[in-house]
Structures are given as C-alpha cells and as structure tokens.
Amino acid sequence: MGQTLLQIEDLHTQFFTSRGVVRAVDGVSLHIDAGETLGVVGESGCGKTITALSVLRLVPEPGKITSGRILFRGRDVTKMEDEEIRDFRGSDVAMIFQDPMTSLNPVTKVGFQIEEAMTAHNRFSASLAKTRVVELLKRVRVPAAETRVKDYPHQFSGGMRQRAMIAMGLANEPSLLIADEPTTALDVTVQAQIIQLMKQLNRELGTAMMLITHNMALVASLCQRVVVMYAGRIVEEGPVEQIFRSPQHPYTWSLLRSVPRVDEARKDRLVSIRGLPPDLTNPPPGCKFHPRCPFVVDRCRVEEPSLGEVALNQVARCWVLMRNVKEEDVAAAKASALSIEAAQKLKADAEAAAAEVDSVAGS
Amino acid sequence: MSVTAGAPFRRGAPSFLSWIPTGRGTTLTIYIVKRLLWMIPVLFFVIVITFVLMHLAPGSPWDREGRQLSPQVVENLNIKYGLDKPLWQQFVIYVWGVIHFDFGDSLRQPGQHVSDLILVSWPYTFTLGAVTFILLVPIGIGLGVIAALRQNSLVDYTALGLATAAASTPNFVVGIFLIIIFALGMNKLTGGTFYFPTGGMPSPFNPFQVELIMPVITLGALPTAYIARLTRSSTLDTLRQDFVRTAWAKGLKARLVVVRHVLKNSLIPVVTALGPTFAFLITGSFITETLFSIPGIGRTFVSSIAARDYTVILGTTILFALLIALVNLVVDVLYVFIDPRVRLTE
C-alpha cells in the first residue's frame, strides 16, 4: 500500500433546480493511494461523474459542493483559492472525458491543445512543452506523431482523439488521472486498444487512476479496487477479485449478473435490473435500492443501513447481504429476471402501444 | 513508375492552369476566380428578372400626376429612348450596353447617365453604411459576449433589454425621436450647443462629420441588436460544449478559455451573419436617407421605382446584386481562415 493520494470525506454535491434539490452525491467517502487504480461503477445518473467533477471543482451550474472535504496530499480542494484550483486542475489531477468527438476544440490544432495544457502550468518551459507534444503523442501510440500534431481534431479518428485526450491528461505528469468512461464512445476493437494503452501507462508511469465506468470488463482488467455507487451513495467497496467473486450487496450482484459473458455457457439468464434508478430529488426512504431489490426485507423499507465490513477490506451497505440469501431465492431472482427475448417482446409491445396512441392523437 | 514532382494531373485545377504551382494559396486564387466568373450568369439572371418584372408593372416613365403629356410627346420620347421597339430588342440593346459598361441615360432626369447618378449618390450611402458597420461590429459582438459570460446578471438583462427594444422599434420611429430630442429639443434647451444638424451631409466622403451621428444610430440600431443577440446565444451555446469543460480541466486561465476556446468557435456564425448585414448597410435605407435628407442610393432606388425610371432601376439593382455577391464571396473566403473544417472545393 502506497501513501494516500486523494481522500474524499463525506462529500455532498447537490443541484439546486426548480424541481427541488437533487442530491447527486450524498455522503461519499473514498480514497485513492498513489499508483493505484480505483474503479467507480454504477448505472447512469448514480453520481459517479459528479463525484469526479467535484474533485476538480468543475461541477456544472446549478450544482454545488455543499459539504465534505476533498483532500489531495493533505490540501483541501474545496477550500482552494481560484488561482490555486486553476493550477491544481490538469497538473495534479487531470481528467479524460467520455466523448472524444466533442471534447476537443474543433478549430484548434491537436498539438497546440496538448501544448497549452503544459504552458498553463509552470512545470515545463514553453520550448520544452513544444517538443514534449510529439513525445506524448508517440507515447499514446499515435502513428506519424510529428505530422499529426499539426492536424485538427476532425482529421483524427475517434480512437486517435481519445489517445490525444489521454496524451493531454498525461502532459503534466499528474499524480492522478480521472478517466470518465474513456471507452464508451468507441467501438469494441478501439476500446481494447485504449484499455491496453491505459494499463501500460499506469504500469510505466505509476500514475494513479480513478476509472469511472459501467463496464465491468474494464474494471476487471484495469482496477485493483472497486467502488460501487447507487443513487449518490457508495453501496459496496472492496478489492476487485473479491467483489467479482463474492459480491455482498444485491445491487453489485445484479450489476455483475447483467454482464453478458462469452466464455460461459448460457445456462443462466442475463439479469436486467428491474425499474429505474430513483429520482434523486425525492429518494425512497430506507435503503435507496429497496424498490428494485429482489431480496428486500421489511427493515430495508424504513431504515437505511450503513457501510459495514463484510469481509477483509470489503464493505457493503445492506441488511441482507448476498451470503445470507438462500439458494432458492437466488434462483427465483434469476428466473424472475427478464430474458433477452422477454425484454425484446416487452419493448416491442411498448412501441406498438405508443404507435397506437400516436395514431389516435393524429386522427 | 516513379513519382515526379509537379505531376501533370492534379485534381481540381484545369489542365491549362497546370503551370501554376500547387498549394493552399493557388487553390484559393482559382476558387476566387471561379466565383467571380460565376457572377456573370448570376447578374444576367438578375437583369432578366428585373427587366421582366419592371415591364410587367403597370404605368410608364411618362405618366404624370395631374396634366398628362400629349400622346405625340410620349411617342417621341418612346422613340428617343428606344421604348417603341419590341421588348426582346430592348433587352438585347440593354445587355449589350451593360457589357460595355454603358447603363444608359435616366428617363426621368434627362441628360443624366445612370452610372453618374450612382457615382454621385452611392458615396453618401457607402460612408453612412461603412461607419455604421465599423461601430456595429465591436458594439454588437461586445454586448453579446459580455451578456453571455455574465448570463442572468444585471449586465445580461440590460444588454438583452436594450437589444430587444432596438430590434422591435421601427427605424422611422427611432429616427424621428432622435430628431425631436437632439435636433429640436436640445436646440431650444441649450440654444444650439447640442444641436445636431439634420439637413443632409455636406461631404459624401467624410466619415467624421457630426451629421452622421443620428443617421448611424437610426440605421444601425436594429442590425446591432441582431448581432448582439446572435453573439449572445452562440456564445452561451459554446460555453456548454464539452471542449470548453476540457479547457477548464486543463487548468487554463479564464481569459484563455474564453478567447481560445469559446470565442474562436462562437464567433463563426456571427461572421456569417455580418456579411449580409454589411451588404444591407451599404445598399442604403430609404427611410433613414429620407428622414435625414441624405441624397443616397437607397432613396434614388425607391424613387426610381415609383417613377418607372427603367434604366435607374436596372442600374441600381445590378449594383446591389454585385455588392451582395461580392460580400458573400468575402465571407466564404474568410471561412477558410476561421474554420479549419471548411475546405474549398473547386
């Protein structure tokens, strides 16, 4: 275990909308050690990205960090002055965004966009920054980097743009790189290349990484530790193998069951988690997951559990825990889950109904 | 097969131009030449349409209010100006003249060449339009950018309110109010100290004359408001883009984020809109020119239509068409320099 690099303590980030206060991040505490790779997983809208943006204090309007501390090497990010936070962004902690197609400025040369990430801080001189651009592009395996620096983003493919984004993130040799779904917008073969690249860079440079994703395969191949988030809260946390082998929170279990696997015979049905994540302006009482949980008990509906140690280094926020669930209940949960065919039929029915409504409304 | 420098076949350039070295500049030159040549058919069709519409409209240049000219006089005038010939012959004669830069004589101002009329009146209009444009660009864009950067602040609401008021007040109202307040009211109150003269422009070429102030405001209020609103919405749109978040995440200083990443993108549609705005301003406004007694081309154009002064109508229409085509060409060429995604196709 290295020293702690980033320590988030009881972070609350809320959005003050006309519909009410959205508790996007609701009491999250986590830490990342130097050189470590932490996976943060969960469905869309569970607060992963907002947690990451909070670390850089880039939460969009009308969002605000309302309480909690974010300590980076002992300095509290939430209390930094404007100039201090500006110099912190990109040099201590860099971030790679989800969609490389829209994350680069279309009217500025790619090389210059990487160069200005360096000239914004004092770590490299202006002339060194210029020469480093080619080096960085080479490091992220952009072919013909010497000529590519003069290209504009529209002359790059999606995979190349994401490589350029990674090069930009690494430009100042940050101690922590936050990657927000870095492969979601890419096709599968390019995804594999980018994962390979990130793995290699993590090994070569020792940069700690916070990987935000809903892709379990990505977590398995890149991360040492994983945090599972649901409705703005951490529901389970532990070492990757342990979580994959014996998830204790039903949500983690469902997430893992919802991953299609090529290497396993299809004896089990693919579980899709029923329903939608809760409305964060008005979350359900008790455990936030109870309306969708297949193993719900009475206590879940009224009282929210706290994060409790369930195994060595593994914590979960649940009254039931998967190890206490009976075999037949697990089987029933699997059986009650929708098969792919059933899900498709349901979708087709819904579309037919919608078409009917349209035709009635149109006549 | 070997690759030789200056290969005989290059895409785009016609073979008779193959001696010209390749490069971005050459592509641009060829593009501009092509676009200029394209203006010839465009102008031809403008003449055709104007000619037909003009002769379809009832009335003739010889109609008078009150006492009419005698039929014998009308016949003689028709013979003198060639209006007795069949329409197609008149058309051929006119186009033949245009090719030789002869736009004919005015029918209602005997002895005046159309080209002379234009050369006398257009400088007034051009000076007024150009001064308006030079003030409009920084004011419109500046207000729009400030309003967007301080969205929902007092500055934003003030700028937006001003722009909405300017955009929804007709220019004859603006002009008349300016005259009442600054020319008449101020004159009485201060005994002439703040008097703004309204009676025409002594010099068509002087952009710094005090007589320009009120016509410039009257003419420029609406287009400035339009540019300010366009700039504001385009900048707000760009501020929400992912690449702007990337720029913040890099740790760039706020000024660099705004200039390099926001404005460089958000001003592209504004430049597009500035082209037609400039064309609109330098082709003159009948209302502004009439209100302030400016002998400009906008007035010449409208009164020539009312008087069925066929040659003046055609002459001014050709000038306007040419100006609009040129301005559009300039905007298209500017695009190459401000947006790298735009490539000229030949």
Image (tube, rainbow, N blue to C red):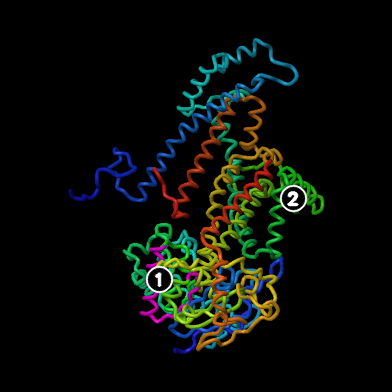
Q: Is residue B259 above or below residue B81?
A: below
Residue depicted at 23% across the width and 50% down the height: B5
Please name the residue that numbered disc 2 is placed on. B195
Task: Let me know if residue A136 is in the magenta part.
Answer: no
- In-front residue for pair B25/A209: A209
Question: What amino acid is labelled 1 in the image?
Answer: Ile
Specify the label residue A195 is tagged with: 1
Between B125 and A79, the one nearer to me in the picture: A79
Q: Chain of mark 1?
A: A
Amino acid type at circle 2 is Tyr
Q: Position of residue B50 (x, y in %)?
A: 57, 28
Quadrant where the C terminus of chain A sits is top right
Using the numbered discs, state the Cα–Cα distance from disc 1 to disc 2 in whole angstroms: 75 Å
Query: Which image quarter is the N terminus of chain A in?
Result: bottom left
In this picture, which residue range is highlighted in magenta? A188-215
Which residue of the protein is positioned furthest toward the right in this rendering?
A: B189
Q: Which mark is residue B286?
A: none
